[in-house]
Amino acid sequence: MLPPDPASVRALLVRANNWIGDVVLASPALHALRAHYAGARISVLARPRVLAALEGSEDLDEIIVFDDRGRHRGLAGRLLLIAQLRRRRFDLAVLFQKAFEAAALAAAAGARRRYGYATDRRGWLLTDPLAETDEIRSRHHAQVFLDLAAAAGAPAEDLALRFPLDARDRERARQELARAGIAETDPLVAVHPGASKTPRAWHPERFGQLAREAAKLVSGRVVVLGSAADAPLARIILDVSGALGVDLTGRTNVREMAAVCERSALFLGSDSGPMHVAAAVGTPVVAIFGPGRP
């Protein structure tokens, strides 16, 4: 079956992934959908934890928050969400998220065409299922999302990763850096020691050694980013690096962290969402990958 005629698609539903890094990797595919279905209203269904990677994006018209721990919890909550979706009368749904529930919600919402990978035993719920072969699983995640958008009729010409930042994010990051004693002219080496899974996290002592050498190269200072839980790692990194560095763990939200990365000369990290965010804002990245495919 051929993809829909763009002129026939007035409302398009995109199911976003549940992790910041995956949402960033899917951003070129979302941009391709926006370019191809320029006349459609694009609604993105997303969980609260990934909103920072979507709010302010020019490639969507609306974010529908999937509050699965609040108003959309349980059967009654899911029925409420389905009613919200049905009111929008979607002509097309593109499901970047691969779970059964994503396809079930799109079908229950009445989306006429439903594109997604035939994973999690959900192929029968999709009008246009794509087989996830070993060859596809071996591809970079960003390419997997691009292949799905292309199947839905939206081939990509612009492959750049995207992360929406605005002047407020940059100003809050500047203020946080200033409070830590960092001048606007100081070159920075940003370090994020956390990882999406513990086995993928590199040793903090080695990050400290790498940060020390990187800071010498750029004649700059080390800034350690992450959640408050990463503070013990930050102390080790700063102790080993011996550089004039600062610990910003627990002191920035995702968008402020992205703005610090944008301002940095280099980002050092493991396989994590912030690593993808740093790449999306144009910062040179050195990433250490552990078990798993990049």
Image (cartoon, helix red, strand yellow):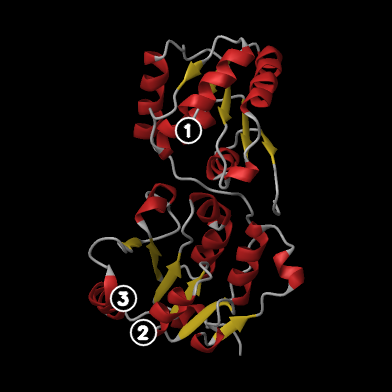
Q: Choose top left, top right, bottom left or bottom right for residue 239.
A: top right
Q: Choose top left, top right, bottom left or bottom right for residue 290.
A: top right
- Residues at marks 1 and 3 touching, judged by CB atoms closer than 8 Å: no
Q: Disc 1 and disc 2: Cα gap in Å?
A: 38 Å
Q: Is residue 8 left or right of residue 144?
A: left
Q: Nearer the viewer, residue 214 or 205?
A: 205
Q: Nearer the viewer, residue 119 or 3?
A: 119
- Residues at marks 2 and 3 touching, judged by CB atoms closer than 8 Å: yes
Label annotation for residue 108: 2
User: Circle 3 sits on which residue?
Assistant: 85
Front of the two marks 1 and 2:
1
Q: Earlier in the sequence, mark 1 or mark 2?
A: 2
Residue at disc 1, secondary structure: loop
Front of the two marks 1 and 3:
1
The picture places residue 143, in percent across and down from the top left corner, at 67, 61
Residue at disc 3, secondary structure: helix
Residue 265 sits above or below residue 12 on the image: above
Q: What residue appears at the point 63 percent right and 68 percent down from the top-left corner?
A: 155
Q: Is residue 188 visible?
A: no
Q: Is residue 289 left or right of residue 162?
A: right
Q: Disc 2 and disc 3: Cα gap in Å?
A: 9 Å
Residue 187 sits above or below residue 121 on the image: above
Residue 148 sits above or below residue 159 on the image: below
